[in-house]
Amino acid sequence: MAVTPQTQFEVRQLSGATNGLPILVAATATAGTVIHTATSTSGELERVTLYAFNAHSSDLKLSIELGGVTIPKDVVEITITTEAGMVKVIENVVLSGGVVVRAFCGTANQVSVTGHVVRMSA
């Protein structure tokens, strides 16, 4: 999809979030906790940006699955240091076709993910 003067942009919450609040990563292995399901509407694309924060007393590795489980094609891995605040995990990854973004961490319920989606349509 080419961006033209007629392209519409809409900022949206992550579909896995309740009222836009952070999503607690409960999964400790694949398939991860659902963070967002991309649009499946023809002619629409979404740019997804995610941040994570770690409430644990130790650094934790977070894995983000972008529609699959193959490393390195589908999985982004990042260490989230303790007390680092919100850490950008992915920025403006363009998705469509109902791709499901999931997350898991070796320690359950210690990392939360938040972010936003910019939906583009012609």
Image (cartoon, rainbow, N blue to C red):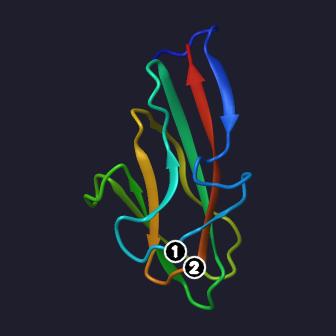
Kind of residue at disc 2? Asn
Task: Name the residue rendered at 36%, 74% in the picture.
Answer: 29
- Residue 62 got which mark? none
Q: Which residue is mark 1?
A: 26
Instruction: Pick whichever of labels 1 and 2 is earlier in the sequence.
Output: 1
Q: Which residue is mark 2?
A: 109
Circle 2 sits in a helix, a strand or a loop, which is it? loop
Q: Position of residue 15 (x, y in %)?
A: 59, 47
Q: Quadrant of residue 119?
A: top right
Relative height, residue 90 to residue 62 (above, below): above
Kind of residue at disc 1? Ala
Q: Are marks 1 and 2 in contact (CB under 8 Å)?
A: yes
Seen in the image, is 12 located left or right of residue 76?
A: right
Seen in the image, is 122 located left or right of residue 19?
A: left
Circle 1 sits in a helix, a strand or a loop, which is it? loop
Q: Position of residue 107 (x, y in %)?
A: 49, 84
Q: Residue furthest left?
A: 70
Q: Quadrant of residue 85?
A: bottom right
Q: Residue furthest bottom?
A: 57
Relative height, residue 1 to residue 83 (above, below): above
